[in-house]
Image (tube, grey):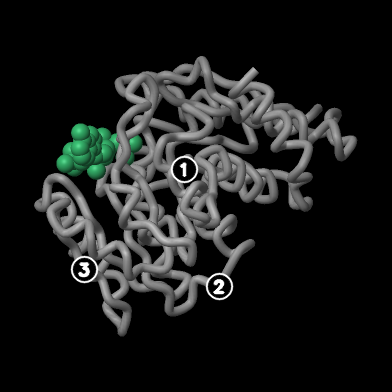
């Protein structure tokens, strides 16, 4: 019997995880040992769904919107960084004992670390919504300092306070609304975690092009469209750019390794992801 892995969420119909993971299993000859499916689980049904998955001996449970925070109360153990972030996207079921992990932060830090170290870098994070949280924790964990820019300053402040309560050492955590975006010029890394530029609003961008320079690394969290206006302008300026799909890919690679204990085959999983996203 293969070990069963599954993604639960609502909506989950268009999830790319099954294609990505199954392509990885196939490439490594693990398709008899692992299989990855999906199941829609609504908010009201989470507790029953978890019980069912345990009864049916699902081994790896990937958790997506809207359950990443709520799921924590059904776990037996939680990994320290997932606990700090306060969200879980990956669960291992070992004989009925559920341990929660978070790989979303690795979706940001790993692709950046392929280009540069995050230690002592100044990062401008534009946005303070759901996606921003794991990104911000990851950056601080890797030794960067952070300034959060957000339309609603209260949300930037809340996130900043939460981060400071965990990383209260020497890392700088600042916040601002969007009226000081010219400051971004002096940052090493610029991240968009707002929804500005997402389909269908592809003419929007979180930052005027004039505040970018060719020394900077630009990270986009939006994967639809493939190339946002922000990414296009950053490339024109000469920035090194990390596309939105890379965040999806890298959180998936890290998750694959937790489920299989094998190195994830990056190129194969990337191809499966891109074929399903942009075909
Ligand atoms: P996600 O879970 O994808 O991060 P979210 O929690 O709704 O989604 O967060 C969306 C982010 O985009 C927020 O930072 C939001 O800013 P607010 O906190 O002020 O709402 C930002 N955002 C969305 N539309 C925006 C707009 N038109 N201008 C500026 N920021 C915007």
Tell me the quadrant of the picture where the N terminus can be found.
top right
Q: Is residue 278 left or right of residue 202?
A: right
Residue at image x 77%, y 42%?
Answer: 267
Residue 166 location, quadrant: bottom left
* Of the two numbered discs 3 and 1 in the rendering, the one whose residue sits closer to the viewer: 1
Decide which of 118, 242 is in the foreground and name it: 242
Q: Please determine whether, in this image, residue 89 is positioned above or below residue 116.
A: above
Q: Which residue is tagged 2? A: 117
> How many numbered badges does the structure rendering display?
3
Sequence-earlier tag: 3 or 1: 3
Query: Which residue is labeled 1 in the image?
Result: 231
Q: Residue 83 vs residue 208: left or right?
A: right
Q: Position of residue 48 (x, y in %)?
A: 41, 23
| Residue furthest right in the image | 29
| Residue 273 seen in the current view | yes
Spatial separation of the CA atoms under disc 1 and disc 2: 21 Å
């Amino acid at each position: 019997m293969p070990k069963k892995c599954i993604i639960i969420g609502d909506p989950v119909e268009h999830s790319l995880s099954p294609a990505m993971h199954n392509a990885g299993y196939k490439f490594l000859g693990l398709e008899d040992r692992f299989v990855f499916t999906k199941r829609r689980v609504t908010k009201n049904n989470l507790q029953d769904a978890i019980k069912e998955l345990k009864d049916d001996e699902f081994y790896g449970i990937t958790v997506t919107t809207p359950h990443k925070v709520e799921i924590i109360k059904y776990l037996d153990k939680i990994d320290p960084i997932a606990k700090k972030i306060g969200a879980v996207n990956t669960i291992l079921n070992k004989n009925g004992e559920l341990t929660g992990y978070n790989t979303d932060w690795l979706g940001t830090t790993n692709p950046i670390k392929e280009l540069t170290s995050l230690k002592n870098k100044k990062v401008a994070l534009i946005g303070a919504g759901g996606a921003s949280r794991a990104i911000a924790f990851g950056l601080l964990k890797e030794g960067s300092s952070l300034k959060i820019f957000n339309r609603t300053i209260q949300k930037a402040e809340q996130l900043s306070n939460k981060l400071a309560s965990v990383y209260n050492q020497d890392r700088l955590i600042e916040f601002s609304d969007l009226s000081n975006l010219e400051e971004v010029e002096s940052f090493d890394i610029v991240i968009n975690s707002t929804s500005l530029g997402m389909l269908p609003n592809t003419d929007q961008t979180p930052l005027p092009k004039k505040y970018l320079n060719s020394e900077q690394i630009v990270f986009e969290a939006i994967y639809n469209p493939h190339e946002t206006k922000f990414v296009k302008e950053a490339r024109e300026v000469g920035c090194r750019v990390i596309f939105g799909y890379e965040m999806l890919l890298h959180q998936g690679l890290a998750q694959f390794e937790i489920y299989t204990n094998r190195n994830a085959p990056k190129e194969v999983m990337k191809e499966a992801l891109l074929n399903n996203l942009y075909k």
